Amino acid sequence: MFFLKEDKINPLEEVKIMFPKEKLVRLRSSGNSELFISDKKVIKYLTKDYFKPYLRNYNLLKRRTDIRLPELLGTRKSKILDYCMVIMRKDKGDLLEDVWEDFSIEKKELILKKMTLLLKKINSISLSPRNVSKSLVFFSKDLNWKEEVRGFCLSKLDEYKGKGFIKKSLYDFLFLVLNENIDYVQNNDYVLLHNDFHFRNLLIDKNFNLTLLFDFETFSVGDKYLDLVIAGSFLREKYQKMLFDFYGRSENFEEISKVYRLIMSINFFKKVNIREGKEVIRFIEKGFPFFNFGPKKEL
């Protein structure tokens, strides 16, 4: 949580002062943003580095797709921190995370089909990494995709081993996973990626319409299967398989998935305490259960 001692005001208190008629609650918080929601509004509280990408990606989806997005009402600068706020209208409906278990298997299958269509619309936007903003590039954009992935994984594994984030036995396993599967990662068709597509970022109404609500700042450019693997990693195995089948997968999708789950693991080593290497190994091999990053509903 951000807190200024001299002002004794944190972001939640500030947005409540700015919007006194709204019953706002903090939905989530990260190092670069905070999310507040009421019955009528969604307020994203962002560092300035993330503010412009957030609006740019929101507007890109608005121009290039028919995805349901919350209406943009305006922006404001924080008076207490070097932050900006994006204010949006909240459509009627519930967070999909909160109501998922209330649905029958048939309804869940329908929702997954709609999620797949939504994800495919995001991934339908082709972008060359050399011609987009640095903030949209997943890696360095200097090499082809396979070499980008290989270089990223090797450098991070060496760094984390050196810093003691991972033990040698786990390092050796992850190194082997990379070498055994990297040649299957050949896709050089760069598309728009959400990078955080799951139930917590979707609103569902009574007619099963989905609205893409949050985290437009996480978008990048890369292989569409990276987005699919990320989305599937938040689902139980049977629903994960449904999502993958609805989307359509390549002949070597299982091998590609191991590499992309390796990337996901690498991205979390600094943020969490991974207690057992077996958890990471199981995640890379099967994709579920997702190892524990803190309090989270099992989806």
Image: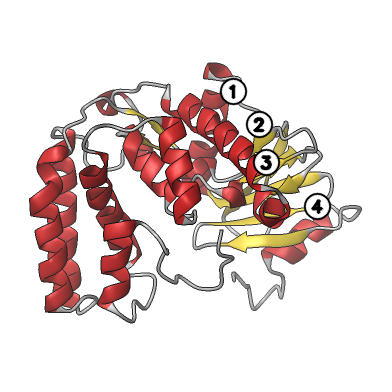
Q: How many marks?
A: 4
- Element under label 2? loop
Between 192 and 179, which is closer to the camera in this rendering? 179
Residue at image x 49%, y 33%? 119
**Nearer the N terminus, badge 2 or badge 3?**
2
Farthest right residue in view: 21
- Element under label 4? loop
Tag 1 near tag 2, CB within 8 Å: yes
**Nearer the N terminus, badge 1 or badge 3?**
1
Going by the numbered disc 3, the residue's amino acid type is Lys
**Nearer the N terminus, badge 2 or badge 4?**
4
Checking the image for residue 62, the label placed there is 1
Residue at image x 27%, y 59%? 285
Check disc 1: other Cα within 10 Å, few if <14, some if 14-19, many if 20+.
few
Give the residue number, with chain letter if any, for mark 3: 107
Checking the image for residue 94, the label placed there is none
